[in-house]
Amino acid sequence: MSQSDSPTTTWFEHLDETVESILKNDPAARSRLEVILCYPGLHAVMIYRIANVFYKAKRYTLARLISQWARTMTGIEIHPGATIGRRFIIDHGMGVVIGETSHIGDDCFLYQGVTLGAGAEARQGEQTRDTKRHPTLGNGVVVGSGAEIQGAITVSDNARVASGSIVLKDVPPNSTVVGMPGRVIYRDGQRINEKLPDIEAEAIKSLKNRIEVLETLLRQLQGDNATNLASDSINQSEQDKLDWLDGNTENESTEDPVEVFLQGAGI
């Protein structure tokens, strides 16, 4: 895991090895001088390392002031309480947000618009102030532009998160995650043959089927004497649909797609 807390690693050593890592990984980088002068991701991370010193000394307001100044200058918001490893690169960087209890390992790479957020825990206010609310990224993790990783989950070593993905669950090592919500499609270089659900389409389909069943039952009630309507008057196929919609069939997932959607998987 990260060695960022090593007392032998100075600010200048962090700067030197991060610049070298950028030159190695970014084909647009032409020289050390260009990287030092023109890379806002580097500026934001190095200012964070100063703010983090004050944060650890419990000079919280000063630390936040420094981080807010960096946010104004670079468009990248890194809370000074975050823990960030060595050779951490933010490419382009505009819109990146890294929360207070985030842990980022060595050699991680984030693109613009990435959020390492607190998820539902953020809405519980002060009662979660001193708890782990933000993600942990292992070593060598790459997160694509616009991706969101929410909550106190772990994205393990050498994982890849595709652009625009929303990750709500732990990610195993050497995996590639795609989608909303994120699903593992590759692990250890092998494709996982799992159909990726379209949660919005599933929710709409479930609602449509329920409406059709209820309309059918309503027509039956209108055509019969409601007081004499026996349970067996319901067409068996319609009852089967109701059972499926309620998750009562065997060997079928009991997760209601509408509930999954409403819980934020499709948002």
Image (cartoon, rainbow, N blue to C red):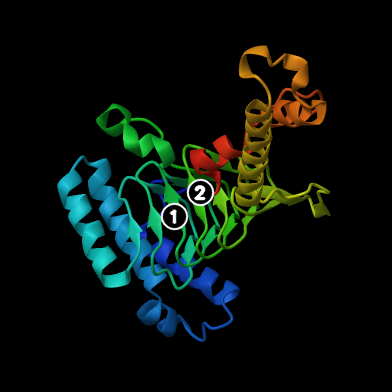
Residue at 50%, 61% in the rendered image: 87
Q: Which residue is mark 2?
A: 149
Helix, strand or loop at label 1? It is strand
Residue at 47%, 59% in the rendered image: 114
Mark 2 and mark 1 lie on one chain; the one further toward the N terminus is 1
Q: Which residue is mark 1?
A: 115
Q: How many marks?
A: 2
Q: CA distance from mark 2 to mark 1?
A: 6 Å
Q: Position of residue 49 (x, y in %)?
A: 33, 56
Would you identify the image quadrant in which residue 115 lies?
bottom left
Task: Tell me if label 2 and label 1 are in contact, CB under 8 Å.
Answer: yes
Q: Position of residue 108 (x, y in %)?
A: 54, 57
* Image quadrant in which the N terminus is located: top right
Q: Nearer the viewer, residue 52 or 122?
A: 122
Q: Nearer the viewer, residue 249 or 83?
A: 249
Give the amino acid type for the residue marked by disc 2 in the picture: Ile
Q: Is residue 39 left or right of residue 59?
A: right
Q: Is residue 173 left or right of residue 87?
A: right
Compared with 87, 169 (above or below) is above
